[in-house]
Amino acid sequence: MKDLNWYFPKSIAEAVDLVQQGKIFPHAGGTGLLSRGFTGINGLVDLSRLPLHYSKIENDSVEIGSMNTYAEAVSVLMKVDPEHILVKSLRNSANTPLRNRITIGGSIAYFPPWSDLMSALLALDADVMLIGENDGQFPVEEYVNDKDVRDKSLIIAVKFNLSNWRSYHYRDIRTKSDYPAFNITILLKQSLNKIEDCRVIIVGTGKKYSRLTNIEKYLINRDVGKINIEEIEKLVEVKFAGKRIDDPEYSSYLAGVELGRGVEQILRGH
Amino acid sequence: MEGVFTVNRKNRKFTFTPDERLLFTLRENGYTEVKTGCQEGECGACLILLDDKPVNSCQVLTASAIGKNIKTVKGIGDLHSPHIVQRAFVETGAVQCGFCTPGMIIATYALLRDNPDPSEEEIKNALDGNLCRCTGYVKIIEAVQLAAERIKNGELE
């Protein structure tokens, strides 16, 4: 057994001080940590007793504390928007006991390639609220891509706006409890017969995630009646690395098909 | 490390290593009704209630559960005074090899506590983290429905 110290801070400030020492990691739900292992970790900071287990909805702004589990986040959002993309993505993620354990903050920090949370948060242009080396509100995308933003900071909450997106979430799984090989989030806003705005994110690609801007460009301002699903499928250019679950080429083909199906389902309800 | 836990309403002090999983701490301290299965959070054999929520004890580091409430299947009912859910599992023949049963009971108990009249779909969702290699789930779903019906009819839990 390696040397591993546990810390049980009584305040967020105390937790931040510990995390800033380096090699001391926050422990939220712990599922990601168990999967990652303890290499390079000298200490764990238990966050479960800190006031990070809250949610606030004011007007259209949603703030979910980082220690909320997937199940709790679904429960919060079900009350205001049962069709919300995070309801669709998190309600089916993993399984019931794991949804009671995986936290929003831990999942953002860990960002596994099978994450059902991150495609939705990236598509929503969500922000993370940090405290520590970096204090303040940062786009999730910046948090994911910039190690300097992530380092020695604690995630306090995630924030996003409720908006009238029509949404679709796809998990590429073989059995219900599989880790998805990839997952897709599509958000669309329609005004009369035209697509007004659109976001398409695939998580699980070689670059961890891809925003399919070519498909967004194809769809935005296009008359709904002139959307050709086969054209969308051909526009999907994503590269999957290795053979985590499927052959990368097959995954890429499948992503195209599922993306086309997703757009069709949002627009035509089937 | 040492810590005090409330297991089945009794305070217990356990000694464990910092990277130990709750599943093994419980088993080493006599709670062998918590079964060791996949150890990856997939099968539900090690399901317990942690602060009233069903979680896989193989996915919980023991230190993170210090001071918390733990309930195993024996905390719900035992041979001498079985819980309504346990009786329903026996009566419907939902138990074959029995290895998955403690987890199934815990998942069902948590479901019926929050939703006493679940649809079949809701039952399947609530048991989505519990694998059974014997029954094909038909009898298990029947058991949950029987327990729900009895609770609805006011039978004592």
Image (cartoon, coloured by chain):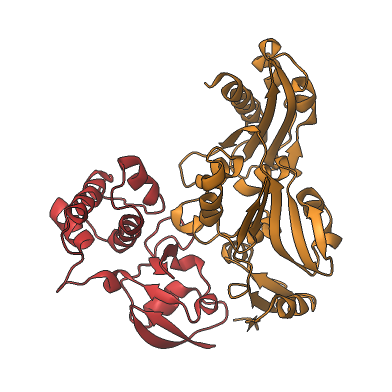
Chain colours: A orange, B red
Q: Quadrant of residue A125?
A: top right
Between A168 and B18, the one lying in front of the other is A168
Residue at the image point whose x is 31% and y is 50% from the top: B133
Between A38 and B102, the one lying in front of the other is B102
Total marks shown come to 0
Split into 4 quadrants, where in the image is the N terminus of chain A?
bottom right
Residue found farthest to the top? A226
Residue A95 location in percent, x, y? 46, 51
Left/right placement of residue B35 relative to residue B82 reads right
Asked if one can make out residue B94 in the rendered structure from this viewpoint, the answer is: no
Between A82 and A235, the one lying in front of the other is A82
Asked if one can make out residue A102 in the rendered structure from this viewpoint, the answer is: yes
Left/right placement of residue B25 relative to residue A225 reads left
Residue B64, relative to residue B103: is it above or below? below
Residue B77, relative to residue A163: is it above or below? below
Residue at the image point whose x is 58% and y is 60% from the top: A68
Residue A209, relative to residue B41: is it above or below? above
Residue B47 location in percent, x, y? 39, 64
Q: In which quarter of the image is residue A199?
A: top right
Residue B91 location in percent, x, y? 13, 55
Residue B39 location in percent, x, y? 46, 63
Left/right placement of residue A59 relative to residue B154 reads right
Residue found farthest to the right? A148
Q: Quadrant of residue A53?
A: bottom right
